Amino acid sequence: MNSEKLSHATNDIRQSGINPNHWYVVAASHEVKTQPVEVKLWHQNIVLFRDSLGKIQALENRCPHRQVKLSHGKIISDYIECAYHGWQFNNQGECVIVPYLEDKQKLPKNCKIRDYPVQELEGFIWLFPGNNPNLIQPLAIPEWEHLNYIATVSVIHYQGHFSFLIENLMDMYHGHLHQDLQAWTDAQLEKIEETPNRIDAYYQAQSYYKIDKIWSISQLFFPGLRKLHSEPLTVSYIYPHWVSTLGEYFKIYCLFCPISLTETRAYLIHFTSLNAFWRLHKLPIKFRKFVKNLCFGSAQNLLDGLVKQDILMIEEEQQSYLENPQQKGYEFNPTIASVQRLINNQ
């Protein structure tokens, strides 16, 4: 009986933890300025801050003196200062200053909190909660700096297990939910490729958008200008993140920060390609940067609308699971089984 319970628990996808030996996105760069910022990654409370050079640092979010959050404090040069008693810690998590020590008193031995490997890349802050950050690199997002791509970012924060969002993103048959917000329709699965760290699902779909002329950008705002045409659609789960491409015109990333078994935060990044506009490429770099920055967020209403609809469904799935974890649904999409295998294996 005990072995049956153990087997069930380890195979329950909604009870799966994360593989800590990967890079996770815990914040967007613009969210960490001059003050400490609290973030959470899989039951770990972490404080982010910038040192005197503006470099991101990450520590366990507690003062070992009275166990209060360091994120209540402030930055003094390269140190983070606790708001309660003014103890200060360096970026290795070592206590370096106790302001009221007398001359004969020494700093407490072994007074150290955990420091985390952290990188700031392509607009986001990546954190490695495992033991060997040199074994793997963060997921590359070359479009972030590329002048031919216009970005829009939407935050997905919901009360539910991270697997629900992964399944949602890999499921190309739920377009019925989004109606006019959807960029494509009639997805036909052609093949699935599965490895221990990655799943690629290849579809042929009917896209509403064709960004091949300068005026075609207006299709994002005027549905009447859209015309269906066939485009390849690829969705990839590159553990622990997700990537999708629709033809040559759109690319989407979803960068994950699982918080707990029932809470997830993620950043959805939508890129519109300007590669077809060859005349634009001949313009001065400064002007192209101006255009890229000016158009940032141009698909915000579209993206936020999609996120809002998906969160509603995902949170209902989570609630249904909590009320009856033994109840199973019916699933005909083979990519979902691939996703669940990968998560459980990780």
Image: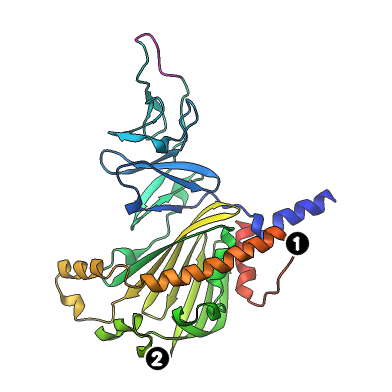
Residue occupying the point 30% across, 71% down: 149
Judge left or right: residue 112 versus residue 100. right
Residue 58 located left or right of residue 165: left
Q: Give the spatial CA distance, label 2 vs label 1.
A: 44 Å
Residue 331 location, quadrant: bottom right
Q: Is residue 15 magenta?
A: no
Main secondary-structure element of the magenta-colored stretch: loop
In the image, residue 172 lies at what x, y percent?
54, 77
Along the horizontal axis of the image, is 209 left or right of 8? left
Q: Earlier in the sequence, mark 2 or mark 1?
A: 2
Rendered-image quadrant of the C terminus: bottom right
What amino acid is at disc 2?
Lys
Percent across and percent down for residue 168 are: 56, 69
Residue closest to the eye, 326 or 5: 326
Q: Nearer the viewer, residue 219 or 282?
A: 219
Residue 304 x, y percent position in the rendering: 42, 68
The secondary structure type at the circle numbered 2 is loop
Bin the neighbour count of mark 1 within 10 Å (Cα to Cα): few under 14, some 14-19, many 20 and up. few
What secondary structure is found at the residue carrying circle 1? loop
The boundaries of the magenta stretch are: 103-108
| Disc 2: which residue | 227
Q: Nearer the viewer, residue 58 or 69?
A: 69
Residue type of the residue flagged with mark 1 = Gln
Q: Which numbered dot is residue 326?
A: 1
User: Can you name the residue that lies furthest to the right here?
Assistant: 1
